[in-house]
Image: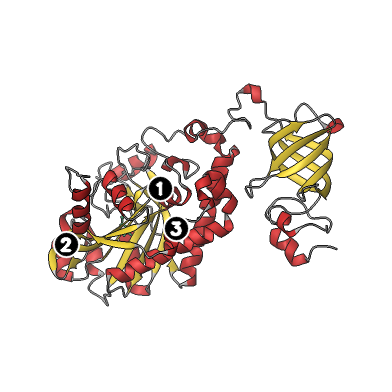
Amino acid sequence: MWCKKSFIYKFKNFFNLTIQKKYSVIASVLENANIGENAEGWVKNLRVQKELIFADVNDGSCAQKLQIIIPKELKTDALTYGSSVHIRGKLSKSPRGQLELVAENVKVLGPCVVLDGYPFNPRTTHPPEYIRQYIHLRSRTNFLSSILRVRSSVTKHIHDFYSSKKYLNVHTPILTSNDCEGAGEVFKVQPDCEDTIKAMMQDGKDKDTVYFGSKTYLTVSGQLHLEAICRGMGNVYTLGPTFRAENARSRLHLSEFYMLEAELAFCYSLEQLQNHIEELLKYIFIETRHTNEADLSLIDKENSKPPAWLQKKFATLTYDEAQDILKKKKVVNTENGLNKEQELALVDYCNGAPVFIVRWPKDLKSFYMKECQDDNTKVEALDLLAPITGEIVGGSLREDDYDRLKSKLPSDKLNWYLELRKFGNIPTGGYGLGLERLLQTMCGITNIKDTLPFPRWPHNCSM
Ligand SMILES: NC(=O)C[C@H](N)C(=O)O
């Protein structure tokens, strides 16, 4: 008996073993490993017995490890936990039906001298805050590698979702002269090259504007650019880095994060926008459970079951209703809007399920949001609140009345944005979804700094 070619192909990339022969193996075993005679990867665990050594090797492509049986005579001192290895051997089935590789040759490619300061060991479950101290070595841990695999899959599912709906994927600029949200939390960009500055200063510019002719920032949102494309080509989305110069070091803030933003053409109601966001979120959750089940459980055992809310429709509360609920629950706030405690209290009120908060007071939201027709103190805005993070999505219908938008425009520099309403304008609505917060909610990750390989936050950008 031997495996069908298509079957081998399907699992080829699960584990980086070279396929040289066809073996009779059980399907459930093959699901987590490829077949072959050569294994390359890192030793995740080593158990030395009288005659044999058992090494669990992982190559980073999946959560599962391949057990390697090493006859004692092949052991070298360099073969330790954490070392990288190339092993040649014969695949066989263990008495428990698991695929394992019986080594014939063991080559240690990169020794790992544990006593020389290697911070991880296989007998300890290191807490995330400990692992975070070793940003450059974090990908050696099961915890972070599972998260990075989930992140990679989520990105793929996002693109699949929009692609199936024929949305155009565009790259909005990172350098921009607008502060879309108007909150002033921007990073300024200037050249740091004496020759360029000297040459360009002769034009009589100041340092801030010498290069582009106007103050330039790292983008806080691609929305305004997306709106420009949407008004010429229909549905669009972008997934890219965004930057916020907030002095925030909380478990929910980063100076650089990835935001998924979409703009829906011919969007006439907030409900239309809400249905689309709900469909997107459920799609990503369900697909990721299929592709990364083992990773999700490894990150947090609680993830072994899908969240009950995946089967239900998300609740919707108006901002005023939400305030009434919070008053009754005595979760009050001295500032305007909702603080984190209140957001999470509202999720709790909805039995731990995501909930839309709609129809926000105009003065709490940005200039581009459409006024509610029946109440000009409110705008057609939504926040989606989710477990663990609170706000995960922010969106709105866009103001499409030229004069009203003109009266609210924060700066002449946005005249181009106003002009979009002049030529073949259409009603649109859009949203931004924080990728890292989505991962927090999906995986049960308390600290946002554990959702990406190289987090940036105040005083932390040293590599
Ligand atoms: N595209 C969006 O609607 C996101 C919004 N500009 C924000 O940054 O929250």
Determine which residue is flagged by label 2.
378
Total of numbered circles in the picture? Answer: 3
How far separated are the C-alphas under marks 1 and 2?
A: 29 Å
Please rate how many residues cluster around mark 2, counting C-alpha atoms within 10 Å: few if below 14, some from 14 to 19, many from 20: many
CB at mark 2 closer than 8 A to ligand 1? no
Which element carries disc 3, helix, strand or loop? helix
Please rate how many residues cluster around mark 1, counting C-alpha atoms within 10 Å: few if below 14, some from 14 to 19, many from 20: many
> Going by the image, does 342 lie left or right of 374?
right
Where is residue 80? Give x, y as percent: 72, 30
Front label number (1 vs 3): 3
- The amino acid at mark 3 is Ala
**Height in image: 27 above or below 121?**
below
Determine which residue is flagged by label 3.
308
**Height in image: 155 above or below 51?**
below
Quadrant including the N terminus: bottom right
How far separated are the C-alphas under marks 3 and 2?
A: 33 Å
Residue drawn 31% across the image and 42% down it: 245
Where is residue 197? Give x, y as percent: 34, 41
Q: Foreground residue, 409 or 354?
A: 354
Front label number (3 vs 2): 3
Q: Tell me which numbered mark, 1 or 2, is placed earlier along the sequence.
A: 1
Determine which residue is flagged by label 1.
257
